[in-house]
């Protein structure tokens, strides 16, 4: 798109009422809720793993599992990355296709790791 064509386009605001654009509507509220739920689930999963592996850890000397080491935590981070990509695209960032491809690459990597 030429500079002249671009000048005629209205730019989407990057923030609304001080919040990133993707965080201002019902979908963003759901994303934040899912992220919080997944982080809570990560803590519960880590606690269960630690409880179930207590004997093994005492023999091997391995460290307890942290919530950040669970698939639930990784899922929360993935949702954050996707939300960030949507925010940047909606904010008019250059090369939106590249931003989307990078975000979707992260999804593909997560699928591979979870198998």
Image (tube, rainbow, N blue to C red):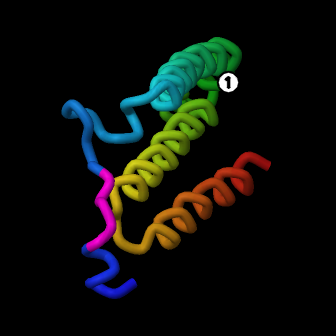
Picture quadrant of residue 8: bottom left
Which element type, helix, strand or loop, lies under badge 1? helix
Magenta segment boundaries in residue numbering? 8-12
Give the camera-side residue of 100 and 45.
100
> Residue 43 in the image: x percent, y percent?
53, 18
> Residue 106 in the image: x percent, y percent?
58, 57
- What residue do we see at 34% from left, 41% from top? 21
Up/down of 59 relative to 22, above or below: above
> Residue 5 in the image: x percent, y percent?
33, 80
- Main secondary structure type of the part rendered in magenta: loop
Judge left or right: residue 10 versus residue 40. Answer: left
Residue under pointer 1: 56
> Residue 77 in the image: x percent, y percent?
49, 40
Q: Is residue 3 visible?
A: yes
Mark 1 is surrounded, within 10 Å at the Cα level, by few (under 14), some (14 to 19) or many (20 or more) other residues, namely: few
Picture quadrant of residue 108: bottom right
| Residue sitting at the far right | 115
- What residue do we see at 65% from left, 14% from top? 48
Picture quadrant of residue 47: top right
Give the camera-side residue of 39 and 33.
33
Q: Is residue 64 visible?
A: no
| Residue sitting at the far bottom | 2
- What residue do we see at 65% from left, 51% from top? 110
- What residue do we see at 34% from left, 64% from top? 93
Would residue 10 be counted in the magenta stretch? yes
Give the camera-side residue of 42 and 88.
88
State which quarter of the image contains the N terminus. bottom left
């Amino acid at each position: 798109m030429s500079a002249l064509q671009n000048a005629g386009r209205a730019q989407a605001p990057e923030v609304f009422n001080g919040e990133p654009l993707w965080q201002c509507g019902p979908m963003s509220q759901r994303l934040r809720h899912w992220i919080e739920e997944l982080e809570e689930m990560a803590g519960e999963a880590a606690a269960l793993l630690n409880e179930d592996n207590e004997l093994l850890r005492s023999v091997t000397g391995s460290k307890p599992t942290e919530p950040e080491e669970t698939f639930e935590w990784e899922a929360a981070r993935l949702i954050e990355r996707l939300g960030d990509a949507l925010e940047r695209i909606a904010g008019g960032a250059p090369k939106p296709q590249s931003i989307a491809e990078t975000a979707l690459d992260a999804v593909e990597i997560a699928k591979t790791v979870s198998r």
